[in-house]
Structures are given as structure tokens and as C-alpha cells.
Image (spheres, rainbow, N blue to C red):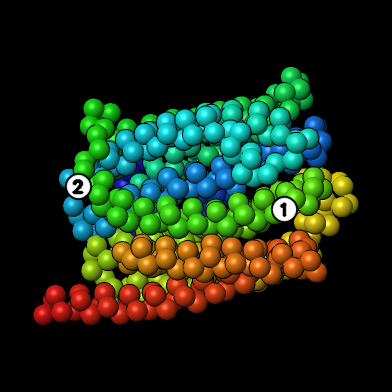
């Protein structure tokens, strides 16, 4: 039975209709990403409605820096995904097993490291984020509890990345559905009944992370396919660690660079006060739901590219890029229309304060109308990593995102007449466009060289 279940969930990405397979892969993944965001959405909605805007601001104030730490290790999981997918495409079963056990061991070690950083560095994190004094105790209480769930969060992320490598995105969706329901119920119970406010939503979030981690580990333990996990084989194989880090470390640094730029912007946002912080937090949370489309397509590019390169089907990779670009163009139009026509209703879910809603609507105009640029930037970054050019992608992100936004904030934004929220937020779409163009050039050059090498190897 286990073997039949495994074959039913996995996918051969090297044959069949790409347009159909991409949707089968990406839709469950997009829904999974949506459910992950529901963890944070439930936190914000519950504390805003039942504890006030200050509590919502406290939950969101240190979010970018915490996300940076999580995304660093999530970036490393990209290395595990690429390596496992290539080994699956090439039929290297024994190597794939060693990759699985190295990746899962690494996730546990990374989670423990993040617990230490979070608990020992709470005050430093709040200082870096310039959290206002009136919400600082609330932010500190939320952060300390939230960081306890880091091992579970990383175990789930690494486990689901291994499942994606073999084309399985559905089981992760099922696990997150269950964990998400538990999270929402615990939020309401702990905040309304026990009046724990930010502590309550933090406990609920940690509980949901633990549940999703337990379920994905159970899945890997019972799986009778290519990614089966054996507790007794948990071990870091140095050759696999080296390969994972070669691909994943630049991806981790790239994720950090994106997050660092967001930290800089969040610090600038915090200087405008509680109303702007609350509006920015609500807006970011809603935008995250739309970005689930982008992230699912980016992961599709990564896994499909890796499997097909392992099978030496280079032309299929080029066709993949055209298919996904078409999907992203359609999604960009839909997101722009929805945000411009129903943005006030979406923000009204989080708060009824008119000033907070107005901040969110302003951000929608600057960030969701050019949504296609963000989608292409993320997709092309994954495409470049899928070619094995992870360091190239990191350098492009360093210059195009982190570097550009740093220059923007320290120069143009410091001019008194331009020291406004709209000017601050404008740095996002400009950097997306520039970075997309740079990644496209890198992909075209890298793809041409890779195809030439494969043709020469066959001669």
C-alpha cells in the first residue's frame, strides 16, 4: 500500500504535457503556501479584532528579521531540492537516499541554532528593527515564544522540499490544511477565552508548526518510494552536504539579501508610527497571499528544470519557461484587478481603522499593479539556480535588490520632500524590474552554454 501511495503522489517531470503538469504541481503548492500564510493572517486578524491595533503592530514589527533567519535555512533547502530532483531524474536511487538523510539532519541542527539566536538575541532583534517602546514588551513576548518553533518549521520546510523534488506537492497541502485549522482554533481559544493576546497567537503558531513537521516526517518514514526516511540513517554525508551547500548557500544568502532589504524598509516604516506599521503589516500579509502564485511557479521551475537536466532534456527546459511566463502574465492581470477593485474589503478583514486601511491601499497601488515584475523576478531567479548558477543569482540579487534599495533609502529617501511612505514603497517595483532584466540575461547566457556543453558531450 505504501508503495502504491508513493507512486500516486509523485510525478515524472521529464515526460508529458508541461502545461498540465505545471498546474498539477503548482496548484497544491500554491494552496500550501496560502495555508502557511494563514498562520500569520490568523495571528494578525485575531489580535487586531480582540486585542487592538497595537498588538497587531507588535506581531508584525519584527517579522522581516525573523523571516530572514528562517529564509536563510529555507534557501539551503533549495540545494536539497535541486540535488534530489537531479538524482531522481538520473535514476540515482542510492545517492538520493543519502541526500534525503543529510537534508533532514541539517534541518534539525539549523532549527536548534535558530532557537539559540532567537532567545538570546531578542533585545538585539528589537533594537535592529527599531520597535517603538509602547509595543516593545508585546513584540518581545511574541518573538520569544515564536522562536521555540524553529526546529519544527525547518523540518517541515526541508521535508516538503524533498517531496517537491519527486513531484509530490499534494501531501504537504493536506498536512498544512490540518495544521492551519488547529492554528486558527487555538488562536481564538487562547486569545478570547484565556486573553493571552500576543502570547496566545505565538503558542498557536508554534503548535501548528509542530503538527505539520510531525506529519511530514511521518510521511517520509512510511513512504516506500525514492525519498523514504530511516531514523537510524540520519547522518550528514559530507559529499552531499557539500553539494547541498554549493547550491543552497547562495540561495540562502540571496533570501537573506531580500530579507535584509525588507528589514531596512521595515525599520523605516517603524519610524512613521503605529498606524503606518499596522497598515504595512496588513498590506504585507495580503500581498503574501498573492505571492503564493509566484512562489509555486518558482518552485515548479526549480524542480522541473532540475529533473529534466538530470535526464538531459534541455529543450524541455526552454519550453517550461515559456509555459510558466504565460501563466504568470495571466496571474499578474488578475492580481492587479482584484487589488484595485476590492483592496479596501481585503484590508477591512484586518482592521476597521480608516487611517490603517488607507496606508494599505497606497501600498497596493505601488506593489500589486506591477505584480508581474515581482513574479518574473522570482521565477527567473529559480530558473538561474536550476541551471546550477546559484552564485550568479545571488550576485544579481545583491546588486539589484539589496544594493539598489540600500542606495534608495540612504539617498533619495533622505531628501525631506521625498521622505514619505509612497517614495519608500516605490523602491520595490523599481528593484523588481531591474533584477528581472538582469536575471533574464543570466538565464539566456547560462542556458545557451549548458546546451552547448551537453551537445558536445554527446558527440
Within-10-Å neighbours for mark 2: few <14, some 14–19, many 20+: few
Which residue ends up furthest to the right in the rendered image? 354
Q: How many marks?
A: 2
Q: Residue at x 78, y 52 (%)?
A: 272
- 181 vs 444, left or right, is right
On screen, residue 459 above or below 283: below
Based on the displayed image, in which of its 4 quarters is residue 345 positioned?
A: bottom right
Check disc 1: other Cα within 10 Å, few if <14, some if 14-19, many if 20+. many
Residue 38 in sight from this viewpoint? no
At x 57%, y 45%, the residue is 65
Image point 42% across, 79% down: which residue?
Answer: 441
- Point out residue 252 in the picture as x, y percentages from the top left corner: 42, 52
288 horizontally vs 359: left or right: left
Q: Provide the residue designation for mark 1.
A: 269
Residue 221 in the image: state x and y as whole percent: 32, 32
Tell which circle, 2 or 1, labels the residue nearer the N-terminal end.
2
Q: Quadrant of the C terminus?
A: bottom left
Q: Position of residue 400 (x, y in %)?
A: 52, 69
Nearer-the-camera pick, 195 or 93: 195
Q: Position of residue 285 (x, y in %)?
A: 67, 50
**Is residue 102 in sight in this rendering?**
yes
* 176 up-or-down from 296: above or below: above
Residue furthest left in the image: 459
The residue that label 2 is drawn on is: 239
Q: CA distance from mark 2 to mark 1?
A: 44 Å
Mark nearer the viewer, 2 or 1: 1
Quadrant for the N terminus in the image: top left
User: At numbered mark 2, what does the secondary structure look like: helix, strand or loop?
Assistant: helix
Above-or-below relation of 4 to 425? above
**Left or right for 170, reference 234:** right
Q: Residue at x 50, y 44 (%)?
A: 69
Amino acid at each position: 500500500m505504501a508503495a502504491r501511495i508513493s507512486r500516486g503522489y509523485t510525478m515524472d517531470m521529464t515526460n508529458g504535457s508541461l502545461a498540465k503538469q505545471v498546474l498539477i504541481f503548482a496548484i497544491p503548492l500554491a494552496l500550501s503556501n496560502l495555508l502557511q500564510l494563514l498562520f500569520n493572517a490568523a495571528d494578525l486578524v485575531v489580535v487586531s479584532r480582540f486585542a487592538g491595533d497595537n498588538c497587531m503592530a507588535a506581531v508584525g514589527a519584527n517579522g522581516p528579521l525573523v523571516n530572514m533567519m528562517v529564509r536563510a535555512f529555507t534557501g539551503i533547502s533549495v540545494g536539497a531540492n535541486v540535488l534530489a530532483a537531479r538524482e531522481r531524474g538520473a535514476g540515482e536511487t542510492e545517492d538520493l537516499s543519502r541526500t534525503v538523510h543529510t537534508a533532514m539532519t541539517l534541518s534539525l541542527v539549523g532549527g536548534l541554532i535558530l532557537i539559540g539566536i532567537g532567545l538570546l538575541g531578542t533585545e538585539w532583534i528589537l533594537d535592529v528593527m527599531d520597535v517603538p517602546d509602547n509595543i516593545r514588551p508585546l513584540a518581545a513576548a511574541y518573538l520569544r515564544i515564536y522562536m521555540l518553533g524553529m526546529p519544527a518549521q525547518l523540518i517541515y520546510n526541508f521535508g516538503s522540499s524533498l517531496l517537491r523534488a519527486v513531484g509530490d506537492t499534494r501531501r504537504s497541502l493536506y498536512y498544512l490544511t490540518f495544521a492551519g485549522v488547529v492554528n486558527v482554533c487555538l488562536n481564538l481559544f487562547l486569545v478570547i477565552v484565556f486573553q493571552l493576546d500576543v502570547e496566545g497567537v505565538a503558542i498557536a503558531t508554534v503548535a501548528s508548526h509542530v503538527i505539520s513537521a510531525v506529519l511530514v516526517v511521518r510521511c517520509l518514514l512510511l513512504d516506500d518510494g525514492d525519498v523514504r526516511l530511516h531514523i537510524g540513517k540520519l547522518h550528514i554525508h559530507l559529499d552531499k552536504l557539500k553539494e547541498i551547500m554549493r547550491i543552497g548557500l547562495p540561495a540562502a544568502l540571496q533570501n537573506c539579501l531580500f530579507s535584509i532589504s525588507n528589514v531596512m524598509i521595515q525599520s523605516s516604516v517603524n519610524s512613521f508610527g503605529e498606524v503606518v506599521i499596522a497598515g504595512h503589516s496588513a498590506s504585507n500579509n495580503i500581498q503574501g497571499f498573492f505571492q503564493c502564485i509566484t512562489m509555486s511557479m518558482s518552485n515548479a521551475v526549480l524542480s522541473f528544470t532540475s529533473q529534466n537536466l538530470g535526464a538531459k532534456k534541455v529543450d524541455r527546459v526552454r519550453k517550461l519557461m515559456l509555459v510558466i511566463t504565460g501563466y504568470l502574465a495571466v496571474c499578474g492581470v488578475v492580481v492587479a484587478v482584484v487589488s484595485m477593485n476590492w483592496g479596501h474589503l481585503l484590508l477591512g478583514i484586518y482592521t476597521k481603522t480608516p487611517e490603517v486601511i488607507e496606508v494599505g491601499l497606497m501600498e497596493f497601488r505601488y506593489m500589486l499593479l506591477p505584480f508581474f515584475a515581482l513574479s518574473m523576478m522570482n521565477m527567473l531567479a529559480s530558473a538561474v539556480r536550476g541551471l546550477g548558477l546559484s552564485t550568479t543569482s545571488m550576485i544579481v540579487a545583491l546588486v539589484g535588490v539589496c544594493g539598489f534599495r540600500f542606495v534608495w533609502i540612504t539617498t533619495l529617501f533622505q531628501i525631506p520632500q521625498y521622505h514619505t511612505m509612497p517614495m519608500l514603497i516605490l523602491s520595490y517595483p523599481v528593484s523588481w524590474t531591474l533584477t528581472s532584466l538582469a536575471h533574464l540575461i543570466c538565464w539566456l547566457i547560462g542556458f545557451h552554454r549548458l546546451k552547448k556543453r551537453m551537445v558536445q558531450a554527446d558527440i
